[in-house]
Amino acid sequence: MNPISPLEQALHAARALVLADLVAGEVAQADVVSLVEDSVTQRRWWVKQWPDGASFVAGLIAQDVQDALLERYGRWPLCPVCGQGDPHALDVEPELGPDPHWVCSKAGVKVAAVGSLADAMGGKPSS
Ligand SMILES: [Zn+2]
């Protein structure tokens, strides 16, 4: 028996990346963490049906959590790039692909890799 399968490694890594971004956005309360766990459970099933999608799970889990948060709390993560105008959430690109990033569709810029949102938040220009 393998101690940890590549699929479990991918899921574990994806979970860690999304949790890091939740911490960066200061929304990592217990009930939010459980949203991540729910998504990981669903994506575990999904990736077992389609093992080639293992590198896609980080982006998918990020989007699952984003959707779940929108229903319960509102937009996440808020764009740290645009200083003015209506607050808006970042999008995950690619929606279904490896190496997912948070992008601002208004400014058309890549903000940070999924898992590295803390860097973008910290880099926000202070006024
Ligand atoms: Zn923006």
Image (cartoon, rainbow, N blue to C red):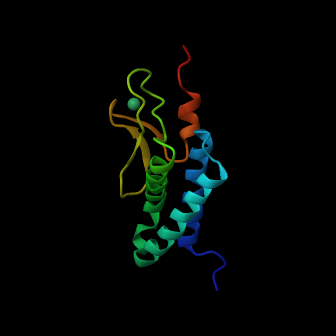
The image shows residue 57, relative to residue 91, as above or below, that is below
Question: Who's the residue at 57% across and 39% down the image?
Answer: 25
The image shows residue 36, relative to residue 124, as above or below, that is below
- In percent of width and height, residue 34 lies at 60, 59
Q: Nearer the viewer, residue 36 or 118?
A: 36
Q: In the picture, which quadrant includes the N terminus? A: bottom right
Looking at the image, in which quadrant does ligand 1 appear?
top left
Question: Who's the residue at 63% across and 75% down the image?
Answer: 4
Q: Is residue 10 visible?
A: no
Q: In the picture, which quadrant includes the C terminus? A: top right
- In percent of width and height, residue 36 lies at 56, 58
Quarter of the view holding residue 15? bottom right
Question: Who's the residue at 48% across and 68% down the image?
Answer: 43
The image shows residue 6, relative to residue 125, as above or below, that is below
Residue 7 falls left or right of residue 106: right
Q: Is residue 47 visible?
A: yes
Most extreme residue toward the front, as rendered? 72
Question: Who's the residue at 54% across and 69% down the image?
Answer: 41
Q: Which of 95 and 55 is in front in this view?
A: 95
Most extreme residue toward the top, as rendered? 127
Residue 98 falls left or right of residue 115: left
